[in-house]
Image: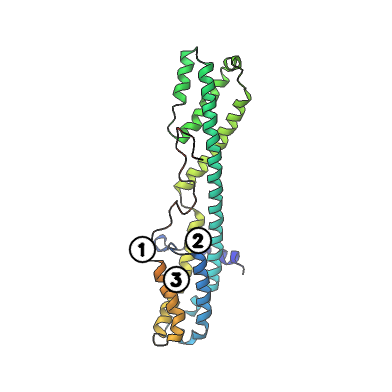
Amino acid sequence: MNNSEMLKSKIPVFEAMNVADVKYPHRNIDFYLQESENLFQWCQQDKDKLTHVGLNWDMISDIPNRIGALREAQSLWVHERFEKTELKAEWKAKSTALYDMLDKLGHALHYAFRKSPTLHKQVTDITNTTRHADAIQSLNSLLVLARGNESLLRAINFDLSNLDQAANLATEVARILAVANTDKNQESDAKILRNKAYTHLKEANDELKECGKYVFYEDEVRLKGYAMAFKNKKSNTGNATPPTSSTIPTVGTLPPVGAQPPA
């Protein structure tokens, strides 16, 4: 089986996992995968001694499948993270355009409606935004106001094609913001899958390492293959906290409203 097939074969196992038992990998997955490959090869000549004290060899024989499943799940998660990075860049560009258009249209309407206190006040109220969703709605509201008073805009030679551009921009920015907010408010399925695959592999690795340490505690040559892996595990887990948004690119933090997004 290839990695994709190995992952697919493990889905029923992952679905049966208790959420409370799923572990977060507080370590570099690439290193952990290589360590797992090394450990599996190392233990082969010790099968008789390890199984003699009760080690489940069926679980150990399944380690390559667990490695393949984690490798595929990690690839899916990395791909999703890159997509988030691209979304963040897209938001930055589009949000800059949003505020530029909001400022440009608001400025034009203030001048075009200068002799109509009622219309002028509407423009002021509409452009008093405090959130990104407000900015998008403000642009839409200005468009409605502008469409209903195009004669006043023509009087100042305002290019009415800007209204079509503004409408398209509002629609696009609303889509990006919706995706960003959805991503921010729910845990990624790809991340959950990766964590379950890691937990599944870790279960077998930990059993193997603990058994190897027990069996070969007086055999320094054989012990090192299990003890070294165990030492690495201890030094990379502990009480560390998962990476934050400062280390994993997301679209969780959006530019402040009321000013141009940072360059």
Q: Name the residue type under label 1.
A: Asn
Residue 110 percent location from the top left of the image: 50, 19
> Which numbered marker is on residue 253?
none
Considering the numbered disc 1 on the image, is that residue within a helix, a strand or a loop? loop
Quadrant (top left/top right/bottom left/bottom right) for the N terminus:
bottom right
Is residue 153 placed above or below 79 in the rendered structure? Answer: above
Does the image show residue 137? yes
Q: For marks 1 and 3, give the one nearer the viewer.
A: 1
Is residue 195 placed above or below 251 in the rendered structure? Answer: below
Q: Residues within 10 Å of mark 3 (few under 14, many from 20)?
A: some
Work out which residue is located at the far top of the displayed protein and give it: 115
Residue 42 percent location from the top left of the image: 51, 81
Residue 29 percent location from the top left of the image: 50, 65
Q: Residue at x 49, y 85 (%)?
A: 46
Q: For marks 1 and 2, give the one nearer the viewer.
A: 1
Between marks 1 and 2, how big is the CA–CA gap? 20 Å
Between marks 1 and 3, how big is the CA–CA gap? 18 Å
Residue 211 percent location from the top left of the image: 42, 80
> Which numbered marker is on residue 194?
2
Which of these two is toward me, 159 or 49? Answer: 159
Between marks 3 and 2, how big is the CA–CA gap? 14 Å
Q: Earlier in the sequence, mark 1 or mark 2?
A: 2
Q: Earlier in the sequence, mark 1 or mark 3?
A: 3
Is residue 144 placed above or below 9 in the rendered structure? Answer: above
> Which numbered marker is on residue 203?
3
What residue sits right under mark 1 in the picture?
239
Q: Name the residue type under label 3.
A: Glu
Q: Residues within 10 Å of mark 2 (few under 14, many from 20)?
A: many
